[in-house]
Image (spheres, rainbow, N blue to C red):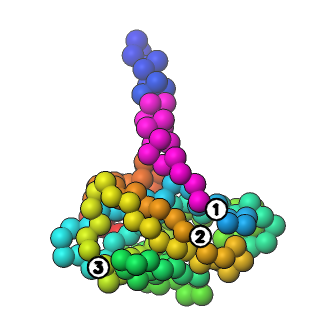
């Protein structure tokens, strides 16, 4: 019991460090992108995942329809468990962002997929991609590349997904 007061302090420090790493925000119209990050890829990998929280501050639903980048093809994917097998596929028709709502892209769920990578994503670098929204238009987002084992600060289900890499 004597040490119980240390826990909130430790949590506070963790959150501050995460907030610092994700200090940048990107926005257009009513759409705000928070905490973007991409995961480092092994040498020779052709695909990599990127994650973020998308907030819609407006009264109109919006839709993430796709994106572009100079180092890869950009797709919007969803990871799903089907018959006990984790599979991912492109989100048909784009990812709906509800009015006054938010959608989290995180490992083992919705994610941005960089395919046909021109080079591996190296930890410590920052990659830039433009996301296309039906109403808000294009938003250019900078994704810091975190280590291959990163989960984006703990707000994900990655820990329960065993060896899932996306
Ligand atoms: Cu994917």
| Disc 3: which residue | 118
- Residue extent of the magenta highlight: 12-26
- Nearest the viewer among 89 and 74 is 74
Q: Where residue 146 sits in the image (x, y, percent)?
A: 34, 55
Q: Inspect the magenta stretch and tell me whether residue 22 lies in it.
A: yes
Q: Are marks 2 and 1 in contact (CB under 8 Å)?
A: yes
The circle drawn on residue 27 is 1
From the Cβ of disc 1, is ligand 1 less than 8 Å away?
Answer: no
Q: Position of residue 119 (x, y in %)?
A: 26, 74
Tell me if label 3 and label 1 are in contact, CB under 8 Å.
Answer: no
Residue depicted at 32% across the width and 84% down the height:
116
| Image coordinates for residue 117, horizontal then vertical, percent | 31, 79
For the C terminus, the quadrant is bottom left
User: Mark 2 = which residue?
Assistant: 139
Distance from Cα at disc 2 to Cα at disc 1: 6 Å
Quarter holding residue 124: bottom left
């Amino acid at each position: 019991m004597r040490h119980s007061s240390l826990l909130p302090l430790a949590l506070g420090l963790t959150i501050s460090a995460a907030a610092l790493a994700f200090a940048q925000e990107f926005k257009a119209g009513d759409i705000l992108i928070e905490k973007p990050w991409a995961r480092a890829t092994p040498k020779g990998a052709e695909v990599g995942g990127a994650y973020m929280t998308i907030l819609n501050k407006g009264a109109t639903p919006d839709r993430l329809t796709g994106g572009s980048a100079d180092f890869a093809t950009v797709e919007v994917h969803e990871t799903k468990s089907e018959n006990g097998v984790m599979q991912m596929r492109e989100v048909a028709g784009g990812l709906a962002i509800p009015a006054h709502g938010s959608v989290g892209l995180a490992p083992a769920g919705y994610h941005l997929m960089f395919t046909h990578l021109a080079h591996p994503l190296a930890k410590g670098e920052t990659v830039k991609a433009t996301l296309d929204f039906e109403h808000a238009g294009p938003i250019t987002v900078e994704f810091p590349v975190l280590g291959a084992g990163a989960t984006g600060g703990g707000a994900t289900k990655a820990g329960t997904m065993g060896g899932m890499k996306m």
